[in-house]
Image: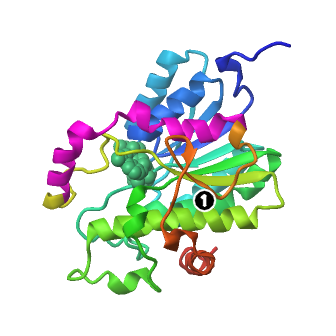
Amino acid sequence: MAVLSENQLLTGKTILITGASGGIGQITARELARRGAHIVLVCRNQERAEHTRHLIQQVSPASEPDILLCDLSLLAEVRTLAATVAQRYEKLDVLINNAGIMPGPLTITAEGHELSWVTNHLAPFLLTNLLLPQLEAAGQARIISVASEAHWLGEIEPAQTLRNAPDKYSSFTAYCDSKLANILFTNELAHRLELTGITANCLHPGVVDTGLVNPRSSRLLKLMWLLARPLMITAEKGAQTSIYLATASQVATISGRYFKNSKPARTSGTAQNRAEASRLWRISEEETAL
Ligand SMILES: NC(=O)c1ccc[n+]([C@@H]2O[C@H](COP(=O)([O-])OP(=O)(O)OC[C@H]3O[C@@H](n4cnc5c(N)ncnc54)[C@H](OP(=O)(O)O)[C@@H]3O)[C@@H](O)[C@H]2O)c1
């Protein structure tokens, strides 16, 4: 029996990855392209997106990644992105919701959402739901969301906007809440997709030396990041669990799980709460007008 080489494994597969212009997403995109997948890079900045395409083509000269520009913090742009994907691609084999931010001072978008809530949760919620027809068309498809251990400190408030008063806002808390939402969303999605060929899983990539904490982050967070830096793993290592979930045959039928180091891992009690997952789903439907 012929053994597939690493490069042939993903031939014919189309993989869309958000936040592919840097950090974990860029390496994930590069490695999946190396294995032969057709990659769709969703980025908000043309120049950075082209840089990623260049890096990919350096290691996989035959690959021709597509670039779709989208500022995920604006749901109108997410809808346009989904419409473009529907128009251009008959099927989507893997969707990787990777883009994420650690917010700086409280920022409310032009559409009225807190920046990290919309970028980290509402955008992937909306994008995933809008792309379900393309995922279904693949027969067997995988949805992967990059969550975080930060979810242990998160909670889902009845209306996220209620606590967006500047005096109550904590960027770190907002981040933790959005990462809890990634896991609850994955659980509810997996439940809703049970009778389809689509799986939904999420992951913690490790503590990874990327641009997540940036000059806009709070002074305390920047200090913590600086101190933790010697212990951090590289983006190459941080991308491994995303790559595993996108490619491994062992997880082809596993759904609704949270992974660390390419293994199923424990989550907080809140993250496992079914009622909380359906409550989040209702809030998200309302906030995205799905
Ligand atoms: N680093 C860690 O230790 C760690 C730990 C746990 C979980 N995570 C998660 O891992 C994921 C990737 O983060 P990272 O560490 O690789 O950080 P990163 O280097 O800052 O990469 C984040 C990516 O998301 C993109 N992005 C941010 N806001 C966007 C928007 N509004 N529209 C479109 N793209 C946007 C960025 O684009 P630009 O290049 O344009 O900024 C970048 O490509 C995130 O979901 C994060 O929460 C990271």
Q: At 60% from the left edge and 77% from the top edge, which residue is drawn?
A: 289
Q: Position of residue 170 (x, y in %)?
A: 26, 72
Is residue 218 depicted above or below 230 in this figure?
below
Q: At 64% from the left edge and 73% from the top edge, which residue is drawn?
A: 290
Is residue 153 depicted above or below 276 in this figure?
above
Is residue 33 depicted above or below 289 in this figure?
above
- 182 or 109: nearer the viewer: 182
Q: At 35% from the left edge and 70% from the top edge, which residue is drawn?
A: 174
Q: Is residue 30 left or right of residue 224?
A: right
Displayed quadrant of residue 104: bottom left
Q: At 65% from the left edge and 59% from the top edge, which residue is drawn?
A: 256
Q: Is residue 138 left or right of residue 63?
A: right
Which residue in the protein does label 1 denote? 127
Q: Amino acid at mark 1?
A: Leu
Q: Position of residue 91 (x, y in %)?
A: 76, 44
Q: Position of residue 29 (x, y in %)?
A: 52, 34
- 88 or 150: nearer the viewer: 150
Q: Is residue 118 visible?
A: no
The span shown in magenta is 221-249
Type of secondary structure dominating the magenta stretch:
helix
Q: Position of residue 151 (x, y in %)?
A: 42, 64
